Amino acid sequence: MLAYHTSRLFVFTDLDDTLFKSLKSDVSIVATTNNEGESQGYSSLQQQKLLNVFEAAGGVFIPVTGRRTNSFLNCSLPVIKNTPYAVVSHGAIILDQNHTLLEQWHEFIKVEFNLALWESELVKMFDHVHNHFTALSDAVRVRLIVDQGITAYVCVKVSKGDYSENKAKDVDLYLKSILPNDMLLHSNGRNFAMLPPYARKEVAVKFIKNKLQIGENDTVFSIGDSISDLPFMKEADFLIVPDGSQIFDRE
């Protein structure tokens, strides 16, 4: 017989296209809004059911998302907002239950990754990429993302009106051609993120697992939709992938 009192349940989960999508149906509920408070993402009946199953089993949810803090806070699902920790900005930031920067994480990446040096390198990378695309046209927007006071990554976005698969491919090829070996490029449609080594979802998940002392008597699930989610998802005992997701289609 399972000793329930010694076994905890944790769910590390991506958000966009995993727990909610932009499509709305008669039985979906609003899951996130934009900065103006307008509905932006909806949780389907199946997505709601999945959350209910884990919630009824006493699961502890820990969001793992590319969203920045402000965008994460636009999520309205209670099981996502009321969590002990949240991984945001592609893993560069861990928030505590008050949605402020977890100071232990800040101290960790300052020492482990030489944060000050990398923040300086990201500024240089931003200037280089921004100047490159500005000289070509205004079809590509480049931003330096700072979240919770930490320089998190360089964001590159093709404008909606100029987007095409060929345009996105050209941007992808250019960014890969200048990307240092110790950085990663996250690509999703017309959105790109140039990530320093501390912006890794799996590194943040490992940190939280260690902090919560998750061990062999605990059970860990992970949920995600994109290929870039797989590294953090492999930190779990069981992986859940939505139908029609990038992982599902690739496999």
Image (cartoon, rainbow, N blue to C red):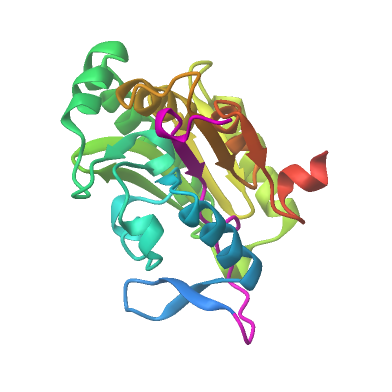
Q: Nearer the viewer, residue 157 or 32?
A: 32
Based on the displayed image, in which of its 4 quarters is residue 211 positioned?
A: top left
Residue span colored magenta: 1-27
**Picture coordinates of residue 208, whole percent (x, y):** 35, 28
Residue 139 in sight from this viewpoint:
no
Say whether residue 198 is left or right of residue 222: left
Asked where in the image residue 2 lies, by quadrant, the reply is: top right
Residue 246, position as x, y percentages in the image? 72, 47
Q: Verify whether residue 22 appears in magenta.
A: yes
Quadrant of the image containing the C terminus: top right
Q: Residue at x 26, y 44 (%)?
A: 147
**Image position, residue 19 (x, y; %):** 55, 59
Q: How many labels does the image show?
A: 0
Name the dominant secondary structure of the magenta segment.
loop
Frontmost residue, 247 versus 10: 10
Residue 111 at x, y = what percent? 23, 12
